[in-house]
Amino acid sequence: MNLHINLTKLFNRKDQLRIMQENVMLIVRDYNHIMNLIEGKERNLFKEHLNELDKNIKQGLGKILWTAGNTDHFVNLCRSSCRDTLRKIKAFQDNYNQIQDEFDKLSTTVLTNVIKRMYKLDEFNEIQENELETKKEFFKTSTNKISKLLIETYQDLFVCHGPEIQKEWLVTMRKLDHSLEKALKNSVKATLLDFQHHIKGD
């Protein structure tokens, strides 16, 4: 008789249980999306963000009484936490990609303006000086954009986090600094190769 009563109760709650299952699967989907999106090199930077997300989700494994039907708050909290974490990861990745785009532009920038024709020395020098001024402004605009993106990223995502995250941020900054140095060297190299091309010809 007790088995029959319990089965009847379950049957009467089938719609509620189905919705609960769908909500849990939404949390699983959101969490898996985050895990698939974040790259290995980013996990250390987002360690505290991910730990906070795990903490919220683990409530459902031990503290939430699923049979009580009061899981809506838990589901909403988890989905909100997933969305917030996902937004921050995407913001970081978008800013990082914009910085890499700037490095690529700097890396391929030729600092001179030489075409195949005869020049008078004064005319040639004046053209190159004007070109250098133009490229100087371009470099200034690009590096200002990089600085702005880095400041925004740090202030929005990492400024309030602990020493371990600050250490990882410095590691990231060193890598970006090295990439900037490499881009500038490549620009000089591209300029010298362009000169060589014009001197030697095709």
Image (cartoon, grey):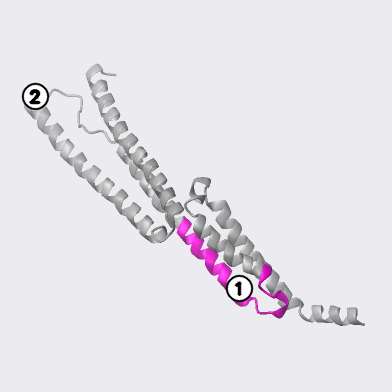
Q: Residue furthest front?
A: 163
- Magenta-span inclusion, residue 74: yes
Secondary structure category for the residue under label 2: helix
Above or below, 61 against 163 in this view is below
**Within 10 Å of the Cα at label 1, are there few (<14), some (14-19), or many (20+) other Cα atoms?**
some
x then y, percent, for residue 73: 59, 76
The correct choice, above or below, for 125 with respect to 22 in the image is: above
Front residue of 9 and 114: 9
Q: Residue furthest right?
A: 1
Please give the name of the residue rendered at 68% of the width and 69% of the height, measured from the top-left corner.
62
Callout count? 2
- Compare residues 62 and 138 and report the one nearer the observer: 62
Looking at the rendered structure, the secondary structure element under dot 1 is helix
User: Hey, which quadrant is residue 118 in on the image?
Assistant: top left
Q: Residue 21 location in percent, x, y?
A: 70, 69
Amino acid carrying label 2: it is Leu
Q: Which residue is mark 1?
A: 74
135 or 186, which is in the foreground?
Answer: 186
Task: Name which residue lies at 41% across and 45% down.
Answer: 171
Magenta stretch: dominant SS?
helix
Up-down: is 199 above or below 83? above
Magenta region: which residues?
62-89
Residue, x 76% and y 79% (percent of image)?
13
Could you tell me residue 121's position as x and y percent? 8, 24
Q: Sequence order check: which comes first, mark 1 or mark 2?
A: 1
The relative height of residue 182 versus residue 54 in the rendered view (above or below) is above
Quadrant in which the C terminus is drawn: top left
At label 1, which amino acid type do we have?
A: Phe
Q: Position of residue 91 (x, y in %)?
A: 43, 57
The mark found on residue 121 in the picture is 2
Quadrant of res 61? bottom right
Q: Residues within 10 Å of mark 2 (few under 14, many from 20)?
A: few
